[in-house]
Image (tube, rainbow, N blue to C red):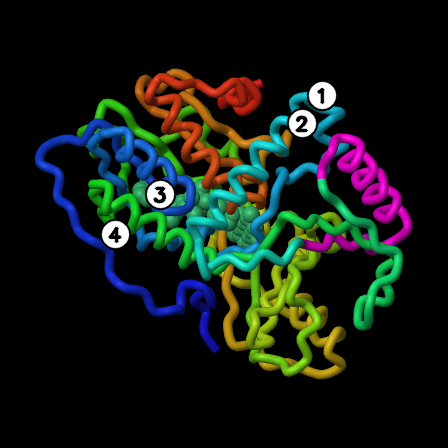
């Protein structure tokens, strides 16, 4: 049984190595989806970029997540409408749909266009999802409603289907992005921890560390709350019930099967909610047992668990990303805080912060302003 993530266990080729002479124009800290996307965008615009990663490319949440590639954000559509208004919610969702399509193209065979199911676990959640379905349709988004679900999902009262979504091999996608970035001239320094902006020699720094405490965010440090997610991957099962990714109980449970039948299941943070607000990247027996019991119940027998792992994501009080200049830290920018929804948002926000550094500030940044975390 491995404690490496199933995604990171897949063999990979080494990346092209560049060595920039002297200090870079921009240093990027974090070799996940955000940092790689940002570095690539900056290098394509002609800047000299050095990317620092404490471990290896995709070694953080980007190589440890559930693999869901979803449009939208962490908050349901109607919740976002209540907080930022209908027009801006519609724009934000459209922007994530475009990013998802672009990410899918870049990912090639590391992306499967499956759609995704959001399951209602009880009547209350059914009503919430139905309201979301109606709101999406009213605003011109594709969405389907299912009142009857096949075995083994018969106990769920209903489900909302999101057609544009899909499933990724997330580590493979980030490695692909990193390769493109290296080919565009980015120097990638793995196994290098940055402890202060001055370490990098750059006047402009992008901190792309999402939930991992980097120590580089000044007053913002800790306000993108480190939150642990745990995952299992089982032996392949002959029954293929979940080729489409499924989300249940307001996103607390999420699971799907690889094409060989292997189940990848994550969640159940709520069995020990307070303990999971931590940056300690270790699995715990209580959450792991909940995940196993959940998966075994669908299959009516015990599936052998071949991989168990944990990762850290950044939770934000209003469920909106945090992208822009860090208050009182001249030349320091950040992008992160996707509240567990960072595969597509990270890709998109990495580019957004790169564009802002290049002088092309997207109006979306008004919503993502880091200073709001300071109250
Ligand atoms: C268990 C789990 C399941 C998830 N499931 C999904 C999902 O299915 N779909 C989805 O969209 N999102 C999911 N997420 C969220 C998503 O994985 C993250 O939001 C996203 O990967 C963040 O990417 P990132 O590049 O911003 O950060 P990360 O991928 O976390 O990368 C940050 C990197 O910064 C490095 N670092 C930190 N400090 C320093 C330093 N001082 N110097 C150098 N390097 C440093 C870390 O080593 C790390 O590799 C999940 C997260 C977890 C943990």
Does any atom of ligand 1 lie closer than 8 Å to the CB of label 4?
Answer: no
Does any atom of ligand 1 lie closer than 8 Å to the CB of label 3?
Answer: yes
Q: Position of residue 217 (x, y in %)?
A: 39, 29
Q: Earlier in the sequence, mark 3 or mark 1?
A: 3
Please give the residue where the numbered disc 2 appears in the rendered image: 89
The label number, if any, that marks residue 191 in the structure image = 4
The label number, if any, that marks residue 313 in the structure image = none
**Cα distance in 3D space between marks 2 and 3:** 26 Å
Instruction: Judge the density around disc 1: few (<14), some (14-19), many (≥20) Cα neighbours within 10 Å.
Output: few
Determine whether 366 is above or below 128 in the image: above
Residue that extends furthest to the right in the rendered view of this protein? 123
Q: For the point 60% across and 47% down, which residue is it?
A: 70
**Cα distance in 3D space between marks 4 and 3:** 15 Å
Q: Earlier in the sequence, mark 4 or mark 3?
A: 3
**Cα distance in 3D space between marks 3 and 1:** 31 Å
The stretch of residues the image draws in magenta is 116-141
Instruction: Judge the density around disc 2: few (<14), some (14-19), many (≥20) Cα neighbours within 10 Å.
Output: many
Please give the residue where the numbered disc 3 appears in the rendered image: 36
Please give the residue where the numbered disc 1 appears in the rendered image: 85
Quadrant of the rendering where the C terminus is positioned = top right
């Amino acid at each position: 049984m491995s404690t490496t993530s199933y995604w990171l266990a897949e063999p990979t080729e080494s990346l092209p190595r560049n060595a920039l002479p002297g200090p870079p124009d921009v240093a990027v800290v974090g070799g996940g989806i955000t940092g790689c996307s940002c570095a690539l965008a900056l290098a394509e615009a002609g800047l000299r970029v050095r990317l620092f990663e404490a471990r290896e490319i995709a070694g953080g949440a980007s190589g440890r997540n559930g693999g869901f590639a979803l449009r939208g954000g962490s908050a349901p559509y109607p919740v976002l409408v209540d907080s930022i208004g209908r027009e801006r919610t519609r724009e934000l969702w459209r922007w994530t749909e475009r990013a998802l399509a672009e990410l899918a193209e870049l990912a090639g065979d590391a992306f499967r266009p499956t759609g995704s199911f959001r399951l209602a676990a009880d009547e209350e959640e059914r009503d919430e999802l139905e309201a979301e379905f109606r709101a999406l349709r009213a605003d011109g988004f594709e969405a389907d409603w299912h009142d009857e679900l096949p075995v083994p999902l018969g106990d769920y009262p209903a489900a909302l289907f999101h057609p544009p979504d899909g499933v990724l091999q997330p580590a493979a996608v980030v490695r692909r992005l990193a390769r493109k970035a290296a080919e565009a001239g980015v120097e990638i320094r793995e196994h290098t921890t940055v402890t202060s902006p001055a370490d990098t020699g750059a006047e402009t720094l992008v901190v792309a560390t999402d939930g991992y405490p980097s120590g580089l965010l000044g007053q913002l440090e800790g306000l993108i709350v480190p939150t642990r997610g745990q995952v299992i991957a089982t032996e392949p099962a002959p029954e293929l019930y979940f080729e489409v990714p499924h989300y249940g109980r307001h996103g607390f449970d999420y699971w799907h099967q690889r094409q060989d039948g292997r189940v990848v299941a994550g969640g159940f943070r709520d069995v020990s909610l307070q303990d999971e607000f931590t940056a300690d990247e270790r699995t715990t027996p209580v959450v792991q047992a909940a995940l196993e019991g959940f998966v075994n119940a669908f299959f009516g027998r015990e599936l052998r668990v071949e991989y168990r792992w944990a990762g850290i994501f950044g939770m934000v009080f209003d469920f909106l990303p945090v992208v822009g200049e860090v208050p009182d830290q001249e030349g320091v920018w950040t992008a992160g805080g996707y509240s567990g929804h960072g595969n597509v948002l990270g890709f998109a926000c990495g580019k957004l912060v790169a564009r802002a550094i290049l002088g092309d500030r997207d109006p979306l940044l008004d919503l993502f302003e880091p200073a709001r975390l300071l109250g």
